[in-house]
Amino acid sequence: MPPAPALARAPPSVRTSSNPATKRSWRLKEDDGDDKHKLLNDLTDPQRGLKPYELARTAAKLQQQRMLSTPKEYTIVIKVLGRLGFWREAVGLMLDMQRNGLTPNVITYNAVMQALVKSGEWKEAIKLIEEMWALSIRPDVITYSSAISACAREGRWVEALQLLAEMERRGIKPDTVVFNVAIAACAKAGEWQRARQLVDSMPARDLQPDIITYNAAINACAQAGEWREALQMLRTLRDQGMSPDTRTYNAAINACDKGRQGVEALQLLVDMFKCEVAPNAITYNTAMSACLKGGLRQQVLEILEEMKSSGEPPDVISYSVAIRACENYDHMMGLMSEMRDKTIVADKVVYGAAISVCAYEGKLDAAQRLLSDMESDRLTPDLVILNSVMSACEKVLDWEQALATLQQAKDSALDPDLVSYKYVMSACGQSGQWNLSLKLLEESRRSYLALDGIAYGIAVEACQIGAQWEKALRLLKNMQAEGIDPDTLTIDFAIRACRAGQQQDQVEELKALQRARRSKRNFAPQGGHRALPRRINEAKDRQLDDWEAEWDREEQGDID
């Protein structure tokens, strides 16, 4: 009998016992009237429709009562355990099989391999292949394809390609399925160049790429944001006489989404209609996201309407993107009402998008109501959402509520960032609370936040409004000492403060500095004292990318 593999320790349920009483109890159970063939039929007959717990109980009965006597019977039970995700039990049953004097064949090993694939145990899958070679059991294409698939599920593209190279080195010819799985492994990791190389190498091996090949390769481009390469592969697919399917378009649109190419995504959606390829929810949602990132806000709302008319029901992701595209408070509230009518439960992303619209229009009361509704739904606001509330406070110059929201972030252990402080500093400064604005600037410094020109500019503006010319000049000196060049708008605030304090000599010096800045940077201030705080929104928009990552994860489930 060959030595038992050291893949995994057999679980207690498959260990043999040296106790005669235990052995007698096994035999007594076997005579209880259970029919082995009936139990095996229960496992293999789809008409029986056994539930997972019933399958597990049947498999355990066959194992514990020692009814299994042939490699085929063991393999049947191992396959069932694999489908149920019980990979340790599958490995243990193969060990039990060997202890009973039966030699597993490649079919048995492949059954165990499938259990490992389902559970994502890529390391154990590689070990299993090593043991097969050690026991002179030759793996086949299915064995390697399954092991590569286990690696692909976990994004282990290096190991996947190593297995592909190993099987060729050992004289096992890979088929298209193997290459497709290897390309999928590269796709998971965004290794689009490797994926492209695999596609290009297939004809030399007398293998023809199929639609699954191209879908995986386009998805690899999508993960890397290589939208041009993705569209090129879509053209290549058509040149090969193949018709793209929904998954193909989803992957290509996803690439455009990652690359913020709204126009290209919209064109792909139009192409789907022309080619009579049915979009699904993922298609619409990803196209909407791409249009939003590409600045095509109106097209986002048009896609939502097209989605409704197509019979594809919008989901929470659809509405979250559409609400972010709204620049009109009434339209946003209409979409929120629509969600309630359709019993679609708003999540944190939806509430965050809605509160952002309120902040954009300066509707603080509405933002606070939505925040309250969110908390009533047992959703905890994150810092991006609270920053939006602070933005609304800044718009209506409610400095007290801005301070309260900042404190809420601290109490929630969210660690306010520089965006948070900028909104509250601006609300305080423009309300005449220059001292609070300066205190917040110093607090942000003590919090180890890297101050920038915008933060200093807000503080200088606060000093200008509060007629504190000396403090404005001191802030300018601090900026320069820290290597931050004040822009012309910040200098203009200081000039106004000095002029109000009748400091003409200081005014002339600052004007000379301002002229030098304009000459050097070819920049002129626009929009008066409100222009500076609005630039805070650039940082806030970058924070919203965190929400987009949540959509990407949900989209990926279909694209893969």
Image: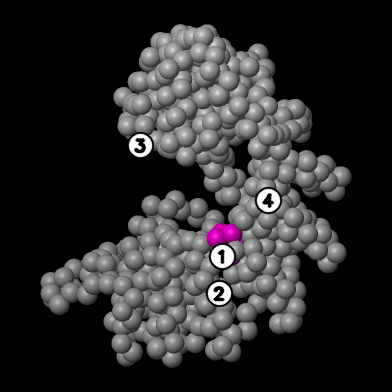
Q: Nearer the viewer, residue 336 or 172?
A: 336
Give how far apart the Cα atoms at labels 2 and 1 are: 9 Å
- Residue type beneath disc 2: Leu
Look at the numbered discs 3 and 2 and tell me whether their residues touch, using CB distance below 8 Å. no
Look at the numbered discs 2 and 1 and tell me whether their residues touch, using CB distance below 8 Å. yes
The answer to whether residue 77 is seen in the rendering is no
**Extent of the magenta region:** 184-190
Q: Nearer the viewer, residue 103 or 305?
A: 305
Give how far apart the Cα atoms at labels 1 and 4 are: 17 Å
Residue that badge 4 annotates = 255
- Residue type beneath disc 4: Ala
Look at the numbered discs 1 and 4 and tell me whether their residues touch, using CB distance below 8 Å. no
Residue that badge 3 annotates = 448
Residue that badge 2 annotates = 161
Q: Residue at x 54, y 14 (%)?
A: 504
Dot 1, crowdedness within 10 Å: few (<14), some or many (≥20)? many
Q: Residue at x 12, y 72 (%)?
A: 21
**Location of residue 175 in the rendering, given as x and y in whole percent from the top left corner:** 65, 77
Sequence-wise first label, 4 or 3: 4
Residue that badge 1 annotates = 185
